[in-house]
Image (cartoon, rainbow, N blue to C red):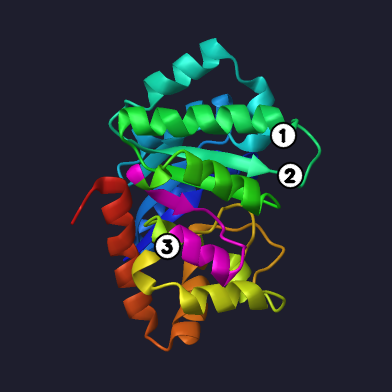
Amino acid sequence: MIFESHAHYDDEAFDGDREELLSSMQENGISYIINVGASIQTTKNTIALTEKYPFLYGAAGVHPSETAELDEEKFSWLKEQCTLPKIVAVGEIGLDYYWEEPEHDIQKKWFERQLELAREIKLPVIIHSREAAKDTFDMMKALHVEEMGGVIHCFSYTKEMAREYLNMGYFFGIGGVVTFQNAKKLREAVEYIPIEQILLETDSPYLAPVPNRGKRNSSLNIPYIAEAIAQIKGISCEEVTAVTERNAKKLFFGEA
């Protein structure tokens, strides 16, 4: 079975067929899905989905690009949601310098606050880092994030940076980008990262793998990702899905 570690099924891209699609997941070999919050509203949407689908769990958090919306009242609400039984991570949180807004200081403030929240409530973190490699790593190292554990979502940096996160015991979310022709740096990192530290993810509805690149993504595309990883590592696709499912259960459910 396949464990989908990062999706956004509350996105409006699924408004036309969400129930039909999600209801088909288990018969298509998807054991569990983590739906990931990216704002206050999408965290609310995520909680609603976890209540409807037994195999779907959630992460509660505010994406760096949405951190300008946060204040103490909203942060207090977010903390309360993190105690719900089917919320298994704080995320996605981090830094994103691709866009000019919000200001970097605002992103850093709420990244730190959400990291400390995860430490307090003893949940792993789902880290978003885009064009902010040094600042993300420096903050995580300073805050001793190895104590809480987590995953670097949509990992896109070098194998040298991968080594630093491996030293912290972190997992790496690998998605459709690994199938792209121009993803040489990522493939080198995937070759380097032990399979025991990799999670499969789609970031649906975004980043669909080849041969469906440019289309709406869904967890049903994960076999293309698993096959790419299998080819890079010289192992079977079945081993990739089995080990990564075990990895995800270890991180999110605390299974040995």
The residue pinned by badge 2 equals 97
Mark sitting earlier along the chain (2/1)? 2
Callout 2 crowding tier (Cα within 10 Å): few <14, some 14–19, many ≥20: some
Say whether residue 143 is visible. yes
* Residue 138 in the image: above or below residue 112: below
Query: Which quadrant of the figure has residue 57?
Result: top left
In the rendering, at what x and y percent does residue 103 appear?
A: 75, 31
Q: Nearer the viewer, residue 179 or 222?
A: 179
Kind of residue at disc 2? Tyr
Q: Nearer the viewer, residue 138 or 18?
A: 138
Please name the residue shown 67% across and 49% down the image: 132
Looking at the rendered structure, the secondary structure element under dot 3 is helix
Q: Label 1 near label 2: C-beta < 8 Å?
A: yes
Residues in magenta, as a range: 147-165
As drawn, which residue projects farthest toward the right? 100
The C terminus sits in image quarter = bottom left
**Cα distance in 3D space between marks 1 and 3:** 26 Å
Kind of residue at disc 3? Leu
The residue pinned by badge 3 equals 166
As drawn, which residue projects farthest toward the bottom? 234
